[in-house]
Amino acid sequence: MQTKFSNPEFKDFITGKLFDNNCQILFDISLKVRNRDLILKELTNQKKIIHIGCVDHLEIIEQKIKSGTWLHNILLESSERCLGIDINPEGISYLQQRHLIPDLVCADITQNTINEISQNQWDYILLPEVLEHISNPVSFLCSLKEKYGNNIDKIIITVPNVFALPEYIYASRNIELINSDHRYWFSPYTILKVINDAGLILEDMYLVNGFWGPFYYNFIQRVINRIFSLTANPRDYKKVIDIRFARSLLVIASFK
């Protein structure tokens, strides 16, 4: 069976009301490729946020800080308050002592009750490139909702896109190119299935981290759209090509 991403029946597959062993999802909606850091900066502007996995890789923090690409610094600059949480004690200590980064907590958010979260109200909790490292992502999200659902309004998740063009290029050579700590690849359908099973409510989705700059991407897309416009049913081809040009998927969901 083929169903469009925008059709009401699509939600019935996500919730399990409908089943098809060979379901074909047509991405007929307009999903723009955006820069991950820029869209996170926009979304968190003057918001109170929690950043899970804030340390990143200790070995490359200095390089990222100097180049202006360390995500936690970007979030500190855009948000009203940014609470950073990570399980890496060496990384947390390094950032506190070397860069005097405020509001950092070393803890496992699913195991410990973090007073800084439970005693305040927050607009967003961010899981950027985190969920693919978790052995049981549904249980992880359920735990967040159970512990802090009354304190946090929404969650922002980014995960690697299984349809990204480089993955196919390497796969054609019988190679899987992957971070060795990853447990999962995600598609738009599977990340929404995880979100639904965790009891979260989808609000929006973006494709993020494209391979080319906006000018080149937009030029290619205009050419493709022009070719499709000459077909008998041009509406059937609404930016289906976009999904291959994004390395990651970004999902916004509500806890309530």
Image (cartoon, rainbow, N blue to C red):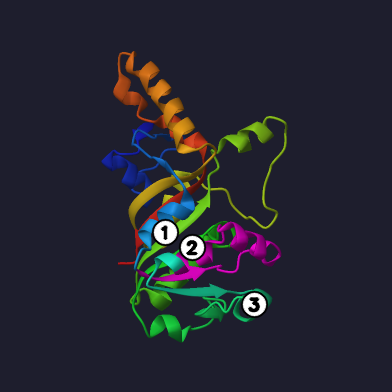
Quick one: SS at disc 1?
helix
- Tell me if residue 21 is in the magenta stretch: no
As measured in the structure, the alpha-carbon distance from the residue carrying label 3 to the one carrying label 1 is 24 Å
Residue in view at x 52 percent, y 66 percent: 72
Q: Are marks 1 and 2 in contact (CB under 8 Å)?
A: yes
Percent position (x, y) of residue 46?
34, 68
Q: Which mark is residue 41?
A: 1
Residue in view at x 59 percent, y 52 percent: 184
Q: Earlier in the sequence, mark 3 or mark 1?
A: 1
- Tell me if residue 53 is in the magenta stretch: yes
Q: Which mark is residue 98?
A: 3
User: Where, quadrant-wise, is the C terminus in this rendering?
Assistant: bottom left
Region in magenta: 47-76
In the image, residue 211 above or below residue 157: above
As measured in the structure, the alpha-carbon distance from the residue carrying label 2 to the one carrying label 3 is 18 Å
In the image, 57 versus 240, the foreground residue is 57
Q: Is residue 26 left or right of residue 108?
A: left
As measured in the structure, the alpha-carbon distance from the residue carrying label 1 to the one carrying label 2 is 7 Å
* Kind of residue indicated by mark 2: Ile
Residue in view at x 45 percent, y 55 percent: 194
* Kind of residue indicated by mark 1: Lys
